[in-house]
Image (tube, rainbow, N blue to C red):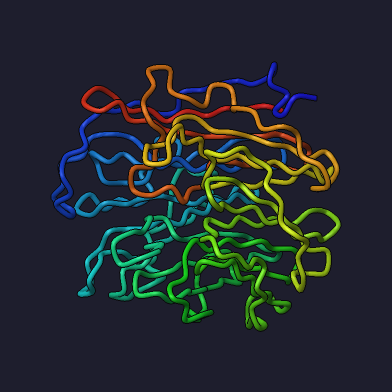
Amino acid sequence: MSNLALAALLVTEIAVGGGERGPWQQNDSRYDYVDDPAVALDEEGRAAVAWVDQGRKDVFFDGVNVSRSPATFSWLPRIALAGNRVYVLWQEIIFSGGSHGGEILFARSEDGGKTFSEPLNLSESAAGDGKGRITPDLWHNGSLDLALGPGGAVYAAWTEYEGALWFRRSTDGGATFAPRVKIQDATPARAPSLAVTGRTVHLAWTDGDIHVATSTNGGASFGEPVLATRSRAYTDAPRIALDATGTLHLAYAQDSRILYTRSRDGGRTFEQARAISRPGGGFPALGIDGANRVYVTYELFPQRQQRPRGLGIVVSQDGGRIFSPPEPVPGSADPAGAPNGSFQGLLMQKLAVNRRGDVAVVNSSLEDGKRSRVWLMRAR
């Protein structure tokens, strides 16, 4: 079988916009383009896509304005589905007195995305939340994640420019949240990723090496973090996911390749990592279906210092033991050669996989001065 049952791949245009990206002038910047897509699938195979209209400075879901804050940029959403409920988490460039703007906002819909609750500020700090910092001069926005658990559990994690990793949970479907909890004073923390089964919550992040902390009580508390990788090279953009057997899978970027490892003992130890892409890959996404097939997509960089163009994919049919040769995702590169989004940062949610094996991938592009687009690719 080809990586994405490629012959069945369907491409759908989600949004088209302008091509203007002026100089950064905080919330007065002159932007007019669409970007920042995120995708989720329900168990019937329905795909949900959120994206950002930079001209309007808001997050949209199926044409519905989720953030409703035209004075401040809203960026890099994450979405999750549970029946008729839609949950959206995003980074809003609110300046609260710190050195960098950023707060983490949340909204939910109980009618399939027709209407959304008033946004709730989960971070409420001046620390530049959502900044995935590597050095004082290098970071990616979108350093946040969202996951659901049973019984109406909703989990959110994010990092701040000042270095800390934060976590909040809701036990009532996102109506209210417990106080935020600091997981780690990292140096600094970046790119959190959540994976949930029952009352077990795994949380991964990087500070140059990748750490995984585990909660066995629904996020009420976390154990001591485990060092999942140890390398002289900078390890970046971890993504974790659980399969039906409880194996915890981890994909991440290192030295322009995508590496993979897994833990079969609840995140206490990890196998020796191995490269699953050719050089020129970064910022992976990870999904697993009910047959324990493991899907990893990633950004394709034609040159190290250039923007990515198109996405790559590898698939394991046997739970991560063997991966297929890397291939481009058909339709993932803009026909005009425009580079991939997001232009705010490449920590994104571009892949969704459900239990029956439906696969959805999103991408965006910006052709400078001409046009921008967001599109969805579907396969099974």
Specify whether residue 155 is in view: no
Work out whether residue 203 or residue 10 is closer to the camera in this orientation and state it. Answer: 203
Q: Is residue 311 left or right of residue 221?
A: left
Q: Is residue 270 left or right of residue 37?
A: right
Q: Residue furthest front?
A: 232
State the residue at coordinates (65%, 73%): 227
Q: Is residue 337 left or right of residue 239?
A: left
All told, the count of numbered labels is: 0
Work out whether residue 232 or residue 184 is closer to the camera in this orientation and state it. Answer: 232
Q: Quadrant of residue 95?
A: bottom left
Q: Is residue 123 above or below residue 6?
A: below
Q: Is residue 42 above or below residue 176?
A: above
Q: Quadrant of residue 20?
A: top left
**Residue 116 locus on image (x, y percent):** 43, 51
State the residue at coordinates (31%, 74%): 127
State the residue at coordinates (15%, 44%): 23
Where does the N terminus fall, quadrant-wise? top right
Work out whether residue 109 or residue 93 is closer to the camera in this orientation and state it. Answer: 93
Specify whether residue 308 is in view: yes
State the residue at coordinates (46%, 42%): 50
**Residue 6 locus on image (x, y percent):** 68, 21
**Residue 84 locus on image (x, y percent):** 60, 47
**Residue 350 locus on image (x, y percent):** 53, 41
Where does the C terminus fall, quadrant-wise? top right
